[in-house]
Image (cartoon, rainbow, N blue to C red):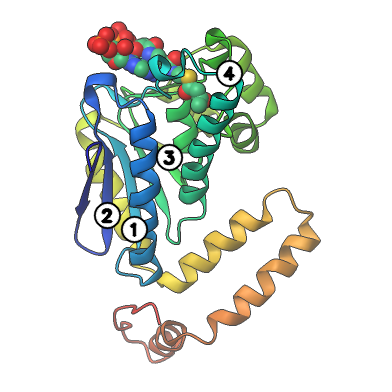
Amino acid sequence: MKYLLYEEKDKNVGVLTINRPEALNALNSGVIAELQTCLAELAKKAEEHSLRCLILTGAGEKSFVAGADIAEMRSMTVEEGRAFGLEGDKVMEALEDFPCPVIAAVNGFALGGGLELTLSCDIRIASTKASFALPETGLGIIPGYGGIQRLSRLVGAGFAKEMVYTTNRIKADAALSIGLVNHVYEPEALMTEAIALAEKITSNAPCAIAAAKKVANASVGLELSKSTRLENPAFGACFATEDQKEAMAAFVEKRPHSPFTGK
Ligand code: CAA
C-alpha cells in the first residue's frame, strides 16, 4: 500500500494510518482505492474476531485528513464528480458497517472529506491540535461523502448547517461541546488514550459488541418501537454464544470469566 500503514497492537487492536503527509493526508483516488481494499481485508479479520477494534488516524503532526484532493477534483466533469463522490461513499459505508468498532483518533485537521471520514467511525477522540470544518461551499461544492447527513444526526441540524454554510473551522474544545468528539487529549497522549479506549472495548464480548453496533446503526432514524423490535432478535441471538454462557456463569460462580473467544 502506497498511502496506508497498518499496525497490529496487543489485545486485538489495529491502527490504520492514512499516510500522505506531503498533502496533509488529502484523499485522492489512490487513497480512496487503498482504503476500499484495505478495509475489505481488515473486515475479514474483524469477522473472525482477530481484530476487535480499529483505530483510524493520520500521519504526521499536523493533519488527520485535510479533505478530498482539490487538485484532482479541480477539472472534474459532472459525471466524474459523481463517480468520485460514490467511491468515497463506499469508504464511508465500509467504516460505518465495519464488523467491529472504529475509533477516529483526530490528530490535526479534519476538513471536508476528513471530517466525513470521522463521522463514519463509531467514536471520535481528538488532540487539542485538532480542528474541524466543512470547507466545501467555499470551493463551490457541497460535502460529497455524506457529511451533511451524518453531521446533522450527530450534532443536530443547526450546528451542521452552520458548519456547512459558513465553512467555519472549529477547534477541539468546541467540537467537544457540541458532541462532535467524545474526548480531547494533549497531542502526545492521543494514541495512548485511543489504544486504552480500544482495549476497554476489546475486553468485552466481540459478538455482543458487533451486535450492538449493528443495532445502533440500524436504529438511526427509526421510530423507537421499530428500533426496539430490531434489537430483540439480536438480543436473543446473544444467548447462543459461548461467551454469554461463560460470562454469566462466571458472574454467578463469583470468578473471573475466561477470555472472550468471539464464539
Ligand atoms: N487537497 C489537495 N492538496 C491539499 C489539500 C487538499 N484538500 N489540503 C492540503 N493540501 C496540500 C497543499 O496543496 C500543500 O501542498 P504543496 O506543499 O504541494 O503546496 C500541502 O498539502 C500543505 O498544505 P498548505 O501549504 O496549504 O498547509 P497550511 O498549513 O498552510 O494550510 C490547510 C493547511 C488549512 C489545511 C490548507 O491546506 C487547506 O485549506 N487545505 C484544503 C482544505 C479543504 O478545503 N478541504 C476540503 C476539500 S473538499 C472535500 O473534501 C470534498 C468532499 O466532501 C468529498
Please tell me which of labels 4 and 1 falls first in the chain. Answer: 1
Residue 93 circle label: none
> In the rendered structure, are the residues bearing label 2 and label 1 in contact, judged by CB atoms less than 8 Å apart?
yes
Q: CA distance from mark 4 to mark 2?
A: 31 Å
- The residue pinned by badge 3 equals 124
Specify whether 152 is left or right of 262: right
Q: Secondary structure at mark 3?
A: strand
Question: On residue 14, which mark appears?
Answer: 2
Height in image: 53 above or below 89?
below
In the displayed structure, 165 sits above or below 258; it is: above
Between tags 2 and 1, which lies in front?
1
Q: CA distance from mark 4 to mark 3?
A: 18 Å
Q: CA distance from mark 3 to mark 1?
A: 20 Å
Q: Amino acid at mark 3?
A: Arg
Between 108 and 92, the one lying in front of the other is: 92
Above or below 231: residue 152: above
Residue in the image at 49% along x and 71% along y: 208
Label number found at residue 163: 4
Q: Which mark is residue 42?
A: 1
> Which comes before the other along the chain, label 3 or label 1?
1
Question: Comparing marks 3 and 2, which lies closer to the viewer?
Answer: 2
* Circle 1 Cα neighbour tier, 10 Å, few/some/many (<14 / 14–19 / ≥20): many
Mark 2 sits near ligand 1, with its Cβ under 8 Å away: no
Q: Quarter of the image containing the C terminus?
A: bottom left
At 66% from the left and 76% from the top, the residue drawn is 233
